[in-house]
Amino acid sequence: MGKSRLEAFSDGVIAIIITIMVLELKVPHGATLDTLLPLAPVLLSYVLSFIYVGIYWNNHHHLMHAVNHVNGAVLWANLHLLFWLSLIPFVSGWMGENHFAAIPVAAYGTVLFMCAIAYSVLVRCLTHHQGGNTLLADAIGNDRKGMLSLLLYPLGIGTAFVHAWLGFGFYIVVALMWLVPDRRIENRLSK
């Protein structure tokens, strides 16, 4: 089956996720910068979450350009990814509202970890469905960044119970790794 409905549905869900996140931001009562200070944790949480959702949207876009068609397993793997992404606004808000307390920071990391697992499952389903020797399989290769992410998230989750801000730092490191655009698929498509 074609991939266009999967792309359109995913884009719509991701747009809704971003909308939910921004609607959670409360406007301060007052016109001075001092009124923004109590909102700093919520804003920081929002910024990182927006970056994460953007990273997933960007990489999902590249994935879909590298394939010609999808099957039922790919549709379910994509829904699995969208499920975990849809929890980002909840854990992001919880973490920000509680000023980066240990349990909300660990929960945030757990959702990010599950997003990474779901994305890996989607990639595996796509490469399996396309056949092992394809543009996508060649572009993904051994996926060092993906594997490193799957290692750093649990480290961040565990560290959050010792020092929440340090745990949060692990999530920033992973985001920075992926913020640099992943050119593997794009480079293969241009050849």
Image (cartoon, helix red, strand yellow):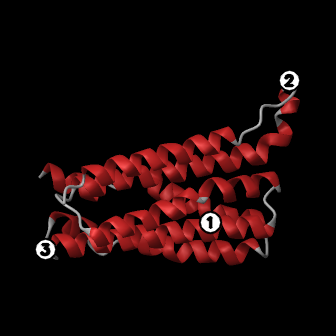
Q: Which residue is mark 1?
A: 170
Where residue 81 is drawn, which disc sits there? none
Mark 2 vs 3, N-terminal side: 2
Proximity of marks 1 and 2: CB atoms separated by less than 8 Å: no
Q: Residue at x 29, y 50 (%)?
A: 5
Q: Is residue 12 above or below residue 112?
A: above
Q: Is residue 63 visible?
A: yes
Quadrant in which the N terminus is drawn: bottom left
Instruction: State the CA–CA distance, disc 2 to disc 3.
Output: 59 Å
Q: Residue at x 69, y 50 (%)?
A: 45
Q: Residues within 10 Å of mark 1 (few under 14, many from 20)?
A: many
Q: Which residue is mark 2?
A: 32
User: Callout 1: helix, strand or loop?
Assistant: helix
Instruction: Name the spot of residue 114 as percent of width and height, x first.
Output: 53, 71
Q: Which residue is mark 3?
A: 133
Q: How many marks?
A: 3
Q: Residue at x 60, y 51 (%)?
A: 49
Q: Is residue 147 above or below residue 164?
A: below
Instruction: Name the spot of residue 95 as percent of width and height, x first.
Output: 75, 58
Q: Is residue 145 visible?
A: no
Amino acid bearing label 2: Thr
Instruction: Name the spot of residue 87 as percent of width and height, x first.
Output: 60, 60
Answer with left or right where residue 101 lies relative to residue 139.
Answer: right
Answer with left or right where residue 65 lies relative to residue 164.
Answer: left
Mark 1 vs 3, N-terminal side: 3
From the viewer's perspective, is the residue at label 1 or at label 3 nearer? 3
User: Callout 3: helix, strand or loop?
Assistant: loop
The part of the image, by quadrant, that contains residue 126 is bottom left
Instruction: State the CA–CA distance, disc 1 to disc 3.
Output: 34 Å
Amino acid bearing label 1: Phe
Instruction: Name the spot of residue 177 as percent of width and height, x first.
Output: 48, 59
